[in-house]
Image: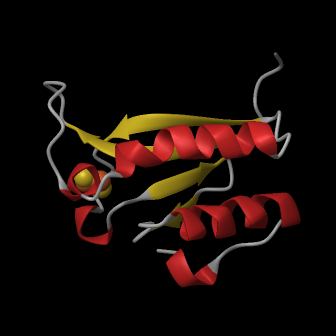
Amino acid sequence: METPKTHILVCASFRPSGEAKGKCHRKNSLEFLPYIENEIIDRGMEDVVVSSTCCLKMCDEGPVMVIYPDNIWYGRVETEAAIDDILDSLEDGRIVEEYRL
Ligand code: FES
């Protein structure tokens, strides 16, 4: 595999101790990871990877997701429909203003 073109970071609220504490975790952000992973595969987005992260320090906006290298931050990503919109936007080369921070 080549290095990915796009990296989706999903806040899992991890603290330095490894404990998950925070709004993203409480709002089920970790449950989105397999959905995103499966959507990436189903859509053939071979140059996109997804990872979970420590707290991204935007807790009040959680669940928070960041798209790199474009540095696009999304918040209140609470449904599969929201994730679908964001993945659609990656394919179309646009930004979903509804969730943008
Ligand atoms: S817990 Fe997600 S930004 Fe802090």
Describe residue 4's horizontal placement relative to residue 85 as left or right.
right
Q: Residue at x 66, y 63 (%)?
A: 84
Q: In the orientation shown, which residue stands out farthest toward the top?
A: 1
Q: In the rendered image, which quarter is residue 35 located in?
A: top right
| In the displayed structure image, the side of residue 28 where residue 90 appears, left or right | right
Q: Quadrant of the N terminus?
A: top right
- 66 or 26, which is in the foreground? 26
Q: Nearer the viewer, residue 41 or 46?
A: 41
Residue 3 visible in the displayed image = yes
Identity of the residue drawn at 43% across and 69% down: 75
Q: How many marks?
A: 0
- Whole-percent x, y for residue 94 in the image: 78, 71
Identified at 48% across, 55% down, the residue is: 65
Q: Is residue 75 above or below residue 3?
A: below
Colouring scheme applied when the structure was drawn: secondary structure
Looking at the image, can residue 5 be seen?
no
* Up/down of 34 relative to 66, above or below: above
- Report the front residue among 23 and 34: 34
Q: Position of residue 13 (x, y in %)?
A: 25, 44
Q: Where on the picture, by quarter, is residue 8?
A: top right
Residue at 81 percent across and 35 percent down: it is 47
Residue 73 image point, x, y percent: 51, 63
Pinpoint residue 69: horizontal percent, then vertical percent.
Answer: 67, 47
Q: Residue furthest bottom?
A: 98
Can you tell which quarter of the image residue 42 is in? Answer: top right
> Which quarter holds ligand 1?
bottom left
